[in-house]
Amino acid sequence: MPLVSRQVLIHTPKGQNNVTQLLHGWAVMDYKPPALAPRSEIVDQGGLQLLSVPYALSQVSQNFFRSQKASAEIALGLLRDPSDLARVLLDAGKPVVGGRLVGALRAAGRDRHADELRKILEAVGYRVTESDPFATPPIVIDPAIKRSPYVMRMHAMWAAMREPAIKAFDKPPGVPTDIKAYLADLDTRYVSDAYNSLSIEGYSVTPDFIERVRSGKWNPDGEDQKSRDAMAAKGYSIAHNAVKASIEKILKGQNAGKVLRNDLPEWNRALWTPSIQAGILKPSELAGYRNGPVYIKNADHVPPPREAVRDCMPDFFALLEREDHPAARAVLGHFVFVFIHPYMDGNGRIGRFIMNAMLASGGYSWTVIPVEKRPGYFKALNQGSAHGNIVPFAKFVGSLVHASRLQPDEAILSRRLDPSL
């Protein structure tokens, strides 16, 4: 089921209920409603004239709460109090819809709002028959959560996706007692990891060059300095060391989410400092989260706008801090980070770093995503971000984690993994 409806309704007095098909399964329908919304219930959002949330809730059918369950709960959560919703219902004379919305609010864990809406409707003589429009219980989002639809959707996704993520993994091995040996194992996997991660992002590197950059046997003052690929490899090496330092903190008992909250800016700076020093990128790239829109090639998902990034990231860290299972931290840490896409570039590499730092928190091995599996990797991510189905991505990562425990590190470079994994 898609995260949002793939059909957009355009309310127009000239509507003829015609459906126009667009790319990737999207469609628009010109709809002539019985009555157009009053001007007071139309809001401007990004240049679009949209129905206000209270008015829209008064117009949707019961099926909306079943086919677009997450969107329905988020819309209910955006109501700061029930007064605007009550006003719309009273103006339209809709007691049946009122009973449905009272039931929806109660099912979503907003009993106080449900009671208040019911009392308002009954005070004017309506007989309110409360009914729950949800086919299955909604995921109750804490009312204290910041009232941003992006933040609320992130919480809803996490709650719905954590169990499938956990089921796709072997039982956590547990934090290793020999921390030094675990960190040494990260070093043995480095060349394979850097080669595959950079290749996934389109950089032209070889395992030999990765090793030369790491060992300092390259020419930082000559042609290599001018190379985008060389600077990316150098940045990856520095960032890997920063991630390794973070993993050591986690293995010594610090909360994995809190470590990421504190250290993520350093990971990002490490990734890009060589490219900035070489003049390939502007210094402002290190300023922090992106200051504009970003799009993902060949993906249905469009990351949230820049303003939403600043709302989402604190809650992203908080979700990781509270999550008690390392498999959920690894899968959703990677997935939600790239869903937000907080930086202009480097989100994929950092997402894989997050995945491995969270894997370490449960004692799982550092896991390389092979470049040969890039199509399946991106397809699985798209299933999660555009359709709300995390199972393909969870199984994809879980199978690679399982394989990484059973085969020598060199296998990822010397041969292709079984394509069935």
Image (cartoon, rainbow, N blue to C red):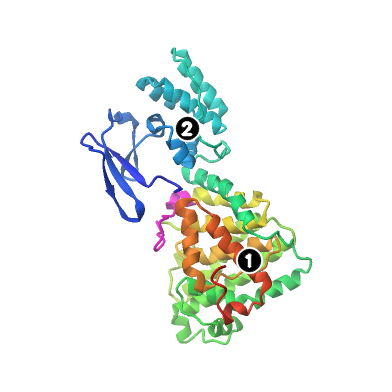
Q: What residue type is labelled 1?
A: Val
Query: In the drawing, does residue 332 fall left or right of residue 39?
Result: right
Measured from the top left, where is residue 384 in percent x and y?
50, 55
Q: Residue at x 63, y 76 (%)?
A: 189
Inspect the magenta stretch and tell me whether residue 295 lies in it: yes
Measured from the top left, where is residue 372 in percent x and y?
50, 74
Q: Main secondary structure of the magenta part?
A: loop
Q: Residue at x 53, y 67 (%)?
A: 349
Query: In the drawing, does residue 150 fall left or right of residue 330?
Result: left
- Determine the image quadrant of residue 92: top left
Tag shown at residue 401: 1
Circle nearer the N terminus (1, 2): 2
Q: What residue type is labelled 2?
A: Leu
Residue most toward the left? 14
**Foreground residue, 214 or 90?**
90
Query: Residue 161: in sight, yes or no?
Result: yes
Q: Residue at x 53, y 58 (%)?
A: 392
- Circle 2 sits on which residue? 79
- In magenta, the rendered stretch is 293-309
**Foreground residue, 371 or 142?**
371
- Determine the image quadrant of residue 256: bottom right
Circle 1 crowding by C-alpha within 10 Å: few under 14, some 14–19, many from 20? many
Measured from the top left, where is residue 133 in percent x and y?
48, 31
Quadrant of the image for the C terminus? bottom right
The residue tagged with tag 2: helix, strand or loop?
loop
Judge whether 51 appears above or below 381 on screen: above
